Amino acid sequence: MLVRIVRMSFQEDQITAFLAIFNASKPKIRSFPGCRHLELLRDLDQPHCFVTYSHWETPEALDAYRQSDLFRTTWAATKKLFSARATAFSVEKLEEVIIEN
């Protein structure tokens, strides 16, 4: 499984606009073929910074999403609101540690 992490910094007066874009897009992203998990996180120390955390079945599934009209339109609208360039990277999930009580 591939985990995709994208950190985005927004202009403070554009946070509401970003959240509206995310809320409109999230069901479509989450139901995109190969997407198994989607979260939106907010930095506690820098509240204008958000992170998307998503799980994809394969790198090809993520690539298909990144080539889709859904991604292109969502990303184009989102990046207009940035205060700095986004940072994105993919990692492979190797292990999840679960402690049974």
Image (spheres, grey):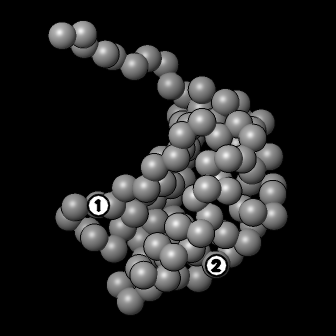
Left or right: residue 34 compared with residue 37: right
Residue 72 on image: x %, y %:
75, 67
Residue 70 on image: x %, y %:
75, 63
Residue beneath disc 2:
77
Task: Give the mark, 2 or 1, whose residue is nearer the N terminus.
Answer: 1
Residue 95 sits in which quadrant?
top left
Q: Which residue lies at the image location 33% right of the left edge and 16% below the top edge?
A: 97
Left or right: residue 50 compared with residue 61: left
Which of these two is toward me, 68 or 100?
A: 100
In the rendered image, the vertical position of residue 54 relative to residue 51, given as above or below: above
**Amino acid residing under circle 1:** Asp
Q: Which residue lies at the image location 59% right of the left edge and 82% below the top edge?
A: 80
Residue 54 on image: x %, y %:
53, 44
Q: Which residue lies at the image location 67% right of the left edge and 30% below the top edge?
A: 57
Left or right: residue 19 compared with residue 61: left
Q: Residue furthest top?
A: 100
Q: Residues within 10 Å of mark 1 (few under 14, many from 20)?
A: few
Residue 37 on image: x %, y %:
54, 40
Give the number of callouts: 2
- Tag shown at residue 43: 1
**Amino acid residing under circle 2:** Ala
Q: Residues within 10 Å of mark 2 (few under 14, many from 20)?
A: some
- Tag shown at residue 61: none
Of helix, strand and loop, which one carries label 2? helix
Q: Which residue lies at the image location 36% right of the left edge and 67% below the top edge?
A: 49
Q: Quadrant of the N terminus?
A: top right
